[in-house]
Amino acid sequence: KRNKYGDSMGLGDSGAAFLIAAAKKQVWWSSLSSLDFAWNHLCVSALGTLEHSWPSTLRSLCLDWNGIGPEGAMLLARALARPNLLGSLDLRSNPLKDEGVLCICKALSAFSLNWLGFG
């Protein structure tokens, strides 16, 4: 891990959004169990696309060391509020602020995770 928001080699927010939208069209997306976008500068665009493309079988989501702030957290919270199978969520080292953490925690109150990373 090199710096607070990822390195200069990441996908970027728009690149990740494009990748998620393209992957959603693939047959394997509907059975995806793990997704790792750590160190890729994800923010609002990527989280908005993920919210509308959430794989119903997703069990592990790693989003650590990105640029996810309160607005991105709100989009993620909307996806998490729907029934899902997620057991592990890593949001460490994102500038979520209090309001972003609160949004995520409220969304997660309906079910329990095996692992949740903040900080």
Image (cartoon, rainbow, N blue to C red):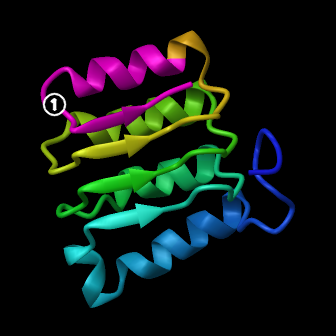
Between 62 and 28, the one nearer to me in the picture: 62
Magenta span of residues: 100-119
In the rendered view, would you say 50 is above or below 65? Answer: below
Looking at the figure, which quarter contains the C terminus?
top right
**Location of residue 114 in the rendering, given as x and y in whole percent from the top left corner:** 21, 38
**Location of residue 28 in the rendering, given as x and y in whole percent from the top left corner:** 27, 85
Amino acid type, residue under disc 1 in the picture: Ser
Q: Residue at position x 15%, y 51% from top?
A: 85
Along the horizontal axis of the image, is 16 left or right of 111? right
Between 21 and 103, the one nearer to me in the picture: 103
In the rendered view, would you say 42 is above or below 8? Answer: above
Hey, which residue is sitting farthest bottom in the picture? 27
Hey, which residue is sitting farthest front in the picture? 1
Q: Residues within 10 Å of mark 1 (few under 14, many from 20)?
A: few
Q: Residue at position x 55%, y 75% from top?
A: 19
Is residue 65 in the magenta section?
Answer: no
Is residue 108 in the magenta section?
Answer: yes
Q: How many marks?
A: 1
Q: Residue at position x 71%, y 52% from top?
A: 41
Q: Residue at position x 75%, y 65% from top?
A: 10
Between 1 and 89, the one nearer to me in the picture: 1
Which quadrant holds residue 16? bottom right
In the rendered view, would you say 51 is above or below 77? Answer: below
Along the horizontal axis of the image, is 64 left or right of 28? right
**Location of residue 80 in the rendering, given as x and y in whole percent from the top left corner:** 28, 38
Mark 1, residue position: 112
Describe the element under mark 1 as helix, strand or loop. loop
**Location of residue 43 in the rendering, given as x and y in whole percent from the top left corner:** 65, 45
Which quadrant holds residue 55? bottom left
